[in-house]
Image (cartoon, helix red, strand yellow):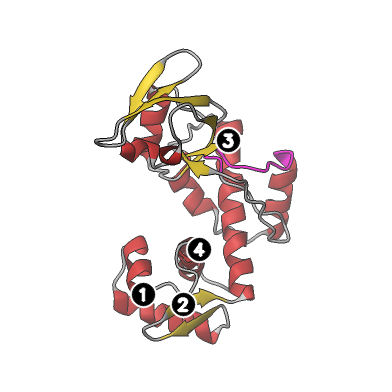
Amino acid sequence: MISLSEENYLKSVYHLEENHPDGVSTNAIAEQLDSKASSVTDMLKKLSEKKLVVYKKYKGARLTESGRVAALGVIRKHRLWEVFLVDKLNFTWDEVHEVAEQLEHIKSKKLTQELDKFLDFPKRDPHGDPIPDAEGNLKVAQKTLLSKLNVKDSGTLIGVKDTSSEFLKYLDKNGLVLGEKIEVIDKENFDNSMLIKLKDKDLRVSLMVSSNIYIKN
């Protein structure tokens, strides 16, 4: 049996591995989980004993296949619950993360299966992130950050990098929602801020904003 705390560590390593394929450092995990490096080291040793991570001192940790499956199982539940909260309980996309953090640790496989079926097998969560299937397969869409686009480039908003409540509220306030068509009208050389065209207005966005929006061309 994997504990709630262990599931959180596995999920953290999974997300951090995207940018650290050769090994995730204890400091990176500690920063993400707001924990002490010494506590992270102790947990990684425990997960290593359970064959869920490969941990080498000074080189960091990588998930084993069993660890990856366990992490994706937690992520699957988290994202399904987010869909449920938005689609069935009228939560907004900036309200669901903390609630889903609690619900993702429910152990019942049948509940997860029935939830998936009840929601008609959704492929993406309210933030545009793909939902792993029951076997742990994850279909990742081709995407790029809005900040990488040039003038006259266009695409569709398919996800966000920053899922904080503050950022999502900003997007809602300015009509930047999933499925929105975006065209780059102008880009400042000085600070890389952009003037973008939405269906009903033009909007200037900072580099901080454009660096947290995923676009599909």
Q: Is residue 84 left or right of residue 135?
A: left
Q: Earlier in the sequence, mark 2 or mark 4?
A: 4
Location of the C terminus (image quadrant): top right
User: Label 3 vs label 1: CA separation?
Assistant: 36 Å
Residue contact at pointers 3 and 4, CB within 8 angstroms: no
Residue 110's image quarter? bottom right
Residue contact at pointers 2 and 4, CB within 8 angstroms: no
| Type of amino acid under label 4 | Lys
The residue lying toward the viewer, choosing from 216 and 57, is 216
Residue 1's image quarter? bottom right
Q: Give the range drawn in magenta.
A: 118-128
| Type of amino acid under label 1 | Thr
Q: Closer to the camera: disc 3 or disc 1?
A: 3
Q: Which residue position is annotated with label 4? A: 11
Tell me the SS state at disc 1.
helix
Placement of 34 over or under 122, stated as above or below: below
Q: Which residue position is annotated with label 3? A: 217
Q: Is residue 110 left or right of residue 80?
A: right
Q: Which of marks 3 and 1 is nearer the N terminus?
A: 1
Q: Closer to the camera: disc 3 or disc 4?
A: 3
User: Label 3 vs label 4: CA separation?
Assistant: 29 Å
Q: Does the segment drawn in magenta span residue 169?
A: no
Tell me the SS state at disc 3.
loop
Residue contact at pointers 1 and 2, CB within 8 angstroms: yes
